[in-house]
Image (spheres, grey):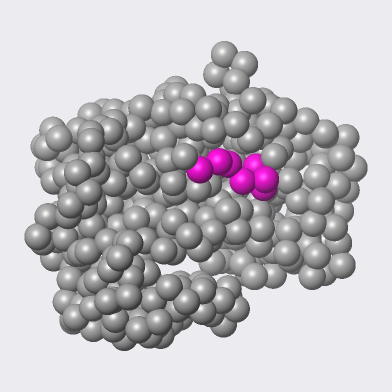
Amino acid sequence: MAKKHIVGIATVALVLAACGGDNSSNEASTGDGDSEGSISGDLTVLTHRTDIVDTVLEDYKERFGELYPDVNIRFEAITEYEGDVSIRLNTEEYGDVLMIPAAVTRDQLPDFFEPLGTVEELGEKYRFVEEQAYEGDVYGISITGNANGYVVNKRVWEEAGITEPPATPDEFLDALRAIEANTDAIPYYTNYGDGWPLGQIRGNMGVLTGPEVENNMAHMDEPWTEGEDINLLDSLVYDIVAEGLSENDPTTTNWEESKNLLGTGDIATMMLGSWAIIQMQDAAENVGASRDDIGYWPFPLQTDGTFRSRIGGDYKMAINKHSEHKEAARAWIDWYTEESGFATDQGGVSVLVDGELPDTLSDFDPLDVEFFELAPRPEGEERLFSDIHNTAEIDLDGWLYNQRLIDIARGAADGDKESYFAELNNRWADARAQVGD
C-alpha cells in the first residue's frame, strides 16, 4: 500500500522542526547507540496483552536482551487493565513501563509519567505523538496505529449477494437486511455484554465532517443533530438494533466467542478498529474456516465519491516517573516501537512516520480510501472536549451511553431515538455552559 494515502486529508499539525538529538535534562535517555552496553536494570512492564505475554512478548524480550544483556524484563499481564492500573496510579507501584490508561487526562500526564521529548522532536519520527502530549511534551509513544471501519465475513456477505462495501448508511442497512433474509448469520453483532466494543464505532468520528470534528463539537450545543458525525454513528447503531438486525439478546454477548462466530460465519459484521483483523483471522483458522473469509471495509459513507478512514494511535507506552531505571525503560520503548515489528506483526498501522500500511488493509487498496488523523486540540483547549463530556456524564471514552442507546432501540428502556438525542443535546449544552467555551 502506498504511504501517500495516509496524508490524504491529514491535518495534524506535527511541526517538523529540526531535531538536535539531545534530550533535555528532565527527559529519559534514549538509550541509543554507544550507550547500549551501559544500560542496566530490572524492569517491570505492565501489559494488557494477556494473549501474547507468554509467546510474542517473550520472544521480544529475548531479542531485546541480545542488545541490552544487563536489562532484565519481567512482564505483568493484567486482564482488567484499565481498572486495575488506574487504581495503582494512586501509588508509586505501577511498573517501570506501562500503557497509559484512558482515565488519565492530559494535564495529569506529568503527575505520573516521564516526558519522552517534545512533540516537535518526536513528531519527526513517530505518528500520533500529540495524542498523549501536554504543553508540548510527549508522555507516551503508541505501540501501533489503527485504521477504522468494520470487519466482515466476506463469505457470508457474498452469500447474501453483496460483494462491494456499501457506500451509504442506507446501503449498509440494506446489506444487513439481505444477510438476514438470505443467510443464517446474525447480520450485525454489537458485543453489548462486554461493553467496550460499543465504543469502537467512535473511531469513525470525522468521516462526515473531517479532522476537526471533536474540536468543533466542543463549540456546539446540539451535536446529536443530522449532519454531525455523532448523530450519524449513533443513528446507524440505533436503526440496526431497532430493526432487529443484531443479536437477539445483547446482554449475553461474549467477546472471545464472538471472534469464533465471525470466523464460522454465524456473525457477519462487527464495527471494530483494524487491530481486530488479525485476531479475527486467527479465530477463523482456529475454528476450521479460512482466514481469507475475513475482510475489512471502511465506514459506509463517501465524500465526493471517496471513502474515508480515520487512523489513530493505540495504547501509548510510557515510563513511570518514579522508576529507578528510566534509561533502561526508555531503551525498551525505543526498541519496541522501532525494532520489534509489533505494529505490523499485529496488522496495525506503523507508528513510524516513514512506515507503510499493513497487508491486513489490502481491502482498502481498490477502494482508494483516504486516511486522516484527528486535528490536535487548539492551544488552551486541550481539555475542553473531555471536560464537556465528563461534566455531561456522557462517557465518550466508554460505552454506558451506547448501552442505553441500544436498550432504547430494543425496547428495554423508555424513549426513542429522537427523545434520547434531545436529552444528549440538552446535557451537552448544559455541560458546555458549566465548563465555559
Percent x, y for residue 269? 70, 48
- Residue 193 falls in image quadrant: bottom right
Percent x, y for residue 20? 19, 44
Residue 359 lies in the magenta stretch: yes
Residue 333 sits above or below residue 129 on the image: below
Percent x, y for residue 323? 21, 78
Would residue 431 be visible to someone looking at this image?
A: no
Residue 106 lies in the magenta stretch: no
- Residue 119 falls in image quadrant: top left
**Region rendered in magenta:** 355-361
Drawn side of residue 312 relative to residue 392, left or right: right
Would residue 162 be visible to someone looking at this image?
A: yes
Residue at 45 percent across and 24 percent down: it is 9
* Near-viewer residue (303 or 246): 303
Residue at 47 percent across and 39 percent down: it is 354
Q: Which residue is at the far top?
A: 304
Residue 330 sits above or below residue 365 on the image: below
